[in-house]
Image (spheres, grey):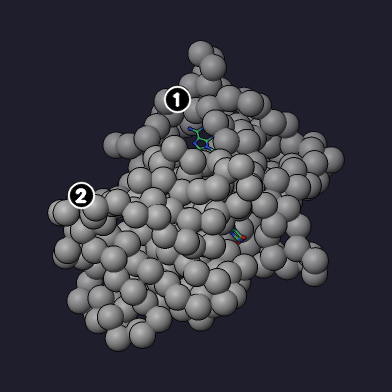
Amino acid sequence: MRNVVIIGSGCAGNTAAIYAARANLKPLVIAGHEPGGQLSLTTVVENFPGFPEGINGPDLVENMKKQAQHFGAEYLHASVIEAELSKRPIRLLVDGDWIETRTLIIASGASARWLGLPNEQKLIGHGVSSCATCDGFFYRDKKIMVVGGGDSAMEEANFLTRFGSEVSLVHRREAFRASKIMIERAKANPKIKFVLNTVVEDVYDVSQGVVTGVKLRNIVTGEAWDYQVDGFFVAIGHIPNTAPFIGQIDLDPDGYIVSKGGARTSCTAVFHAGDVQDRTYRQAITASGAGCMAAIEAERFLEAEGH
Ligand SMILES: Cc1cc2nc3c(=O)[nH]c(=O)nc-3n(C[C@H](O)[C@H](O)[C@H](O)COP(=O)(O)OP(=O)(O)OC[C@H]3O[C@@H](n4cnc5c(N)ncnc54)[C@H](O)[C@@H]3O)c2cc1C
């Protein structure tokens, strides 16, 4: 029987592990399909406090893991396939075995949706991004493209005009899903150029190791052309990693965990941390802060139960 199991090894899970380990709770972290979480996909991170020169994303999460292990956290390289959250102890199916725990911290994140272009994944962190707040700063006076038609695409495009010499907003339809006010704000911005009825067929140039342009196709006329860009932002939403918890814990219509205050969820002894609940900020530092909150709540919960 574990005191604390943490699902996820991104910023939220690793920070929860540091706090839970330092509270002598010997947490078990189930690392999942993406050890280190989303930061393991990127290159330099310039906005995590404490690193004036910036730090590589994979190094940052690896350091957090080492810090947690130093205080006694254990890591298991496996994924949670099924969970029983309504009964105590909580049970998790991992690698064919059931793990039992008194408390659970769900820090399973929300994965960015990508377009599925042939070269997209190879250029993540080298010009391809899913986060304007994180990476906009790298594209000062550069040509930026944003793909998407919802509120987040409008918001990202508007934000990126602070940096780019030009921001083209590519959308496969004529009409947008975004709210009227967001569309109007984007349309009033002279730096945003709308490229409608158009899809991106690929992003270049893997041989140079950096984004140099994209291939576009107008789906009405069939015309295809190359376009030079330096930054390519995909803003078509996120998928919260909550599949094993559906039907057991309160989720919002998009699948994010609904917070019941602090780090509490609708299930006793189950706490949330990071992007799996936070659809607003989605930053490494906010995920780490949430991991800290969840671990403190788990520790107080165990204390109140006499463990
Ligand atoms: C390309 C890119 C660049 C970014 N750059 C920055 C930046 O510069 N600065 C910044 O602040 N933020 C940045 N972000 C955002 C930041 O990475 C996220 O906000 C942060 O990683 C969220 O942390 P998290 O721990 O909540 O989730 P994640 O990092 O998504 O981690 C989720 C973890 O859960 C695990 N998991 C999922 N399902 C299961 C399961 N069933 N069983 C077990 N484990 C599971 C995964 O393996 C993973 O380890 C960037 C994101 C991306 C994609």
Q: Read off the residue under disc 1.
A: 81
- Image quadrant assignment for residue 52: bottom right
**Is 50 positioned to the left or the right of 229 in the image?**
right
The answer to which of 59 and 299 lies nearer the viewer is: 59
Q: Position of residue 168 (x, y in %)?
A: 38, 69
**Is 150 positioned to the left or the right of 84 in the image?**
left
Mark 1 → mark 2, Cα distance in angstroms: 43 Å
Pick the quarter of the image with the C terminus: top right
Residue drawn at 80 percent across, 66 percent down: 53
Residue 154 seen by the camera: yes
Please, what secondary structure does the residue beneath circle 2 have?
loop
Q: For disc 1, does the CB lie below 8 Å from ligand 1?
A: yes
Q: Read off the residue under disc 2.
A: 222
Crowding at dot 1, Cα within 10 Å, few <14 / some 14-19 / many 20+, comes out as: some
Mark whose residue sits in front, 1 or 2: 2
- Image quadrant assignment for residue 280: bottom left
